[in-house]
Amino acid sequence: MTEYLLNLFVSIINAGGYGGVFFLMILESMIFPVPSEAVMPFAGFLWFSGTMSFWPIVFASTLGSIIGSLVSYAIGFYGGRAFILHYGKYFFLNEKHLLMTENFFSKFGNKAVFFSRFIPVVRHLISIPAGIGEMPLARFTLYTAIGAGMWNSFLAYVGYLLGSNWTEIKKYSEGIDIVIFAVIVAYCGYWLYRQYRRARFLPEQSNHTDEKH
């Protein structure tokens, strides 16, 4: 499945050039299973081979990331949580992924939109809780642009350095993704545990106060 998708992304970029990069990064910033690690390094390889240039790659990919994120923001703004719960399974996403992303956004607030661009799974969903939380649109767009621009540039540059071995980044990024994902799950679990302890402690404290009165 992974090999098929990788070949599909390569074909789209070969056929559409910068437009192909733009289109794939729109999907990448939504809930579709299009990892940037499988798109941007190949664009970097085309830069290495002289077929593309760096700044147009960055512009096309970042603009695609912004548009895809704005679509997801709108889904969240108009009640997108139900959309993920009903249709997320068709895009390899589930309620656990959404809950993790919501906790991440609750913990870090608006900054989560920036940091999420470097985190697997979360980057696909973060725009939805941002929309649900009615994050100011201008700030959301700015953080998305900066984060996506940095991440896309990094992946394209790595693809350029690797040249014809650009597929190697996917092997390393998958391992890194697993580690980051595990850390996020552990952190969210710890955060939920603290919230649970706090919720238990407050009623007990309230009861002691009432007894004194």
Image (cartoon, rainbow, N blue to C red):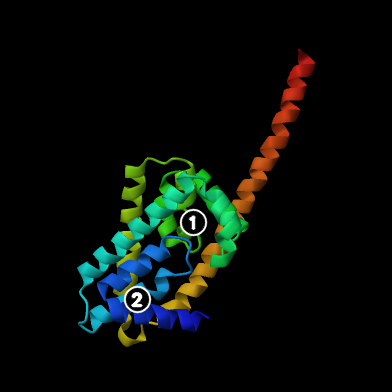
Q: Residues within 10 Å of mark 1 (few under 14, many from 20)?
A: many
* Left or right relative to 188: residue 17: left
Q: Residue furthest right?
A: 211
Q: Nearer the viewer, mark 1 or mark 2?
A: 1
Q: Residue furthest top?
A: 213
Q: Amino acid at mark 2?
A: Pro
* Coordinates of residue 177 in the picture (x, y in percent): 50, 68
Q: Secondary structure at mark 2?
A: helix
Q: Residue at left 49%, top 56%? A: 125
Q: Residue at left 55%, top 49%? A: 81
Q: Residue at left 31%, top 73%? A: 20
* Left or right relative to 26: residue 211: right
Q: Amino acid at mark 1?
A: Leu
Q: Secondary structure at mark 1?
A: helix
Q: Residue at left 23%, top 84%? A: 49
**Residue 100 makes an appearance in the image:** no
Q: Nearer the viewer, residue 197 or 5?
A: 5
**Residue 14 makes an appearance in the image:** yes
* Coordinates of residue 161 in the picture (x, y in percent): 29, 79
Residue highlighted by disc 1: 125
Q: Can you tell which mark lies on residue 41?
A: 2
Q: Quadrant of the C terminus?
A: top right
8 up-or-down from 117: above or below: below
* Coordinates of residue 197 in the picture (x, y in percent): 70, 40
Q: Can you tell which mark lies on residue 199?
A: none
- Work out whether mark 1 precedes mark 2 in sequence or the reverse, and give the earlier one: 2
Q: CA distance from mark 1 to mark 2?
A: 22 Å
* Coordinates of residue 58 in the picture (x, y in percent): 26, 66
Q: Are marks 1 and 2 in contact (CB under 8 Å)?
A: no
169 up-or-down from 27: above or below: below
136 up-or-down from 173: above or below: above
